Image (cartoon, rainbow, N blue to C red):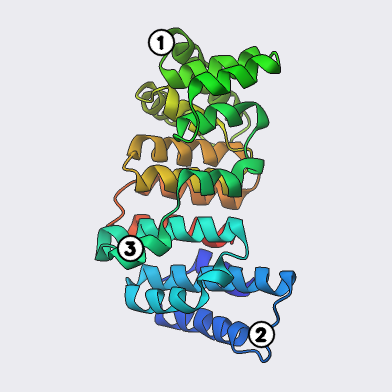
Amino acid sequence: MALRAEAIEGSLVSGKLVDEIRQLYEETFNKKPFTRTARYLSIASYTLGEYLVSLALMSDHETINKLLEGHLWVLNANGLVSVLTRLMLNALLGPRVGLSSELEGKLGVNPEELIDAFGSHMYTEFLLALRVAIGIAKPEFEIKLCEEFNDEVCIDLVLAVKGNSVVVKQLREGVINDFNNSLKGFGFDVESLINEFRELVSGLDGRSLVQLIAPSNSMARLALMLHALINGDEKLAKAQALIGAVNFAGKLPVRLYLEVYKECCDLGKDEFRLAIAKLFFYHV
């Protein structure tokens, strides 16, 4: 916890901090015997994820590759940590060092894995449409499931993903209104944020809008934001960051999401890389 706090508040690329994270990793993995209980493996997964991301900030892909060769199974012991860590590594390493085919195979996160890990962290009423939006389900099949539950909202959301202009317009207006309402009570001038969010959302299609409203918590939003970044959808990633700053309680996540939004979205820029890394350390 102390290292996470230091990572969020200080410089994530300082040699001292990375060395301290490495020491924590070594204490965890060099313990004899290495306990293979569910609790210990989950703790080890978190520790490994933090170490890997700190190495990615330094573009040390060789050490990352060696760690994954021996410990990928430990990282995968916790599905949430594994998916979020691999998304982070893709985002941080790709623009700087490029991913070898070997490393890309270890770090790839397909849409099915994303939903398996974070499906329970999405709003239930948006989940079927989200599956269509990220390409793991056909709209016709999901609409049938919506009809079985007599869920008109579910049907409309899938239609929005398909590109129904009327439904997309209604959804976009609803997203903007919800954002504006979320800003009530904020202690600073929010007019510029309202205008910026409206401009961003006006450029999103139904597929992106569903991804924007689906997360029910901050960790799931970070995952979908990273997914958008990796796939080159900077508008969606920026909108995810801005809505993340108003959707969740607490001054720290508000500050961290706003920092990501302000620096978005050049993954080759140190300021942006550090901003998303701080969000990662907040959650993992």
Give the residue at mark 2.
Answer: 34
Residue found 70% across the figure and 77% down from its top: 36
Q: Earlier in the sequence, mark 3 or mark 2?
A: 2
Does 235 sit left or right of 128 as displayed?
left
Residue found 51% across the figure and 70% down from its top: 72
Q: CA distance from mark 1 to mark 2?
A: 56 Å
x and y percent of residue 4 in the render?
57, 69
Residue 11 visible in the current orientation: no
Above or below 245: residue 29: below
Residue found 50% across the figure and 27% down from its top: 210
Image quarter in which the N terminus is found: bottom right
Nearer to me, 262 or 40? 40
Helix, strand or loop at disc 3? helix
Residue 49 visible in the current orientation: yes
Q: Earlier in the sequence, mark 1 or mark 3?
A: 3
Give the residue at mark 3.
Answer: 93
Q: CA distance from mark 1 to mark 3?
A: 37 Å
x and y percent of residue 33 in the render?
68, 90
Nearest to viewer (mark 3 / mark 2): 2
Give the residue at mark 1.
Answer: 165
Image quarter in which the C terminus is found: bottom right
**Type of residue at label 3?**
Leu
